[in-house]
Image: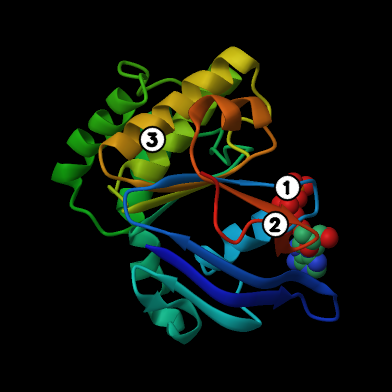
Amino acid sequence: MIRAINVSKHYPGGRNVLQEIDLHLPKGQMAFLTGPSGAGKSTLLKLIARIETVSRGTLLLDGQDLAKLKRRHIPQLRRQLGIVFQDHKLLADRSVFANVALTLQVAGVRRAHIKSRVRAALDQVGLSGREQDSPLSLSGGEQQRVGIARAIVHSPKVLIADEPTGNLDPQLSSEIMDLFRNLNRHGMTLLIATHDLGQVERLDCPVYALQHGRLQNQEARP
Ligand SMILES: Nc1ncnc2c1ncn2[C@@H]1O[C@H](COP(=O)(O)OP(=O)(O)OP(=O)(O)O)[C@@H](O)[C@H]1O
């Protein structure tokens, strides 16, 4: 589902942030991306989301070469992809419902379908009945759940998450990771960048470890 072949990335005027990355995340798998701060985790996720483009090598998402993707086809790509950020990026002046609905509105989904799909997504993350609340009235863990509902409401094939538990205590982190595990059991492919080695140990998924822009284990463990 995600395939990187000899992928390198340098930002304009900068050094190589990612070097000769080979990675294969098959459909239906959940894997972690670990590594110290600055190792290149966010950059790799940004390449997969086509927020950034590869400098060398080939990056395929569901067989599609992301470097060859025309700008006008990027929205189509993003419909296959859910993205979860550490800092939620929720709109504070809109309700929980409106935040989650936004993904579908942008994708041009008809109004009649939006309500049921937003409700289903909020139900999946355990936030039924909170539709009209303001994100500001939610705890950090609940806000992250809204971020996840927003990322899955359009039923993406692949979910990428950048430090999704970065600000959460161990109990909430476990709840969020269990939520990801559950999505994975229902067929979603997930790549999760995290510093949280306790969760990595607990969940026993394959791990891609980055160090100074290089993968330490081109074959992920286990
Ligand atoms: N837009 C950019 N322009 C230039 N350099 C950048 C840019 N974005 C990231 N970098 C550099 O690339 C390197 C990798 O950054 P990246 O954010 O991918 O690391 P990370 O592993 O996600 O770190 P963290 O765990 O702290 O989020 C860092 O040295 C960073 O300064």
Instruction: For marks 1 and 3, give the one nearer the viewer.
Output: 1
Q: Which mark is residue 35?
A: 1
- Dot 2 or dot 1: first in sequence order is 1
Q: Residue 15 appears in which quarter of the rendering?
A: bottom right
Q: Residues within 10 Å of mark 3 (few under 14, many from 20)?
A: many
Residue 125's place in the image compared with 109, above or below, is above
Classify mark 2: residues with Cα within 10 Å, few (<14), some (14-19) or many (20+): some
Question: Is ligand 1 within 8 Å of the beta carbon of the residue shown at mark 1?
Answer: yes
Q: Residue at x 29, y 48 (%)?
A: 154
Residue 37 located left or right of residue 156 = right
Taking the image as four quarters, which one is ligand 1 found in? Answer: bottom right
Amino acid carrying label 2: it is Gln
Which residue is the site of mark 2?
Answer: 216
Which dot, 3 or 2, sits closer to the camera?
2
**What amino acid type is highlighted by mark number 3?**
Ala
Whether residue 72 is visible here, answered yes or no, is yes
Decide if residue 214 is on the left or right side of residue 27: right
Give the label on residue 149, or none: 3
Tell me the mark number nearer the camera, choosing from 2 and 1: 2
Residue situated furthest left in the rendering: 112
- Horizontal and vertical percent for residue 96? 42, 29
Residue 94 visible (yes or no): no
Q: Earlier in the sequence, mark 1 or mark 3?
A: 1
Judge by depth and name the residue closer to the eye, 36 or 106.
36
The answer for how far apart the CA atoms under marks 3 and 2 are is 33 Å
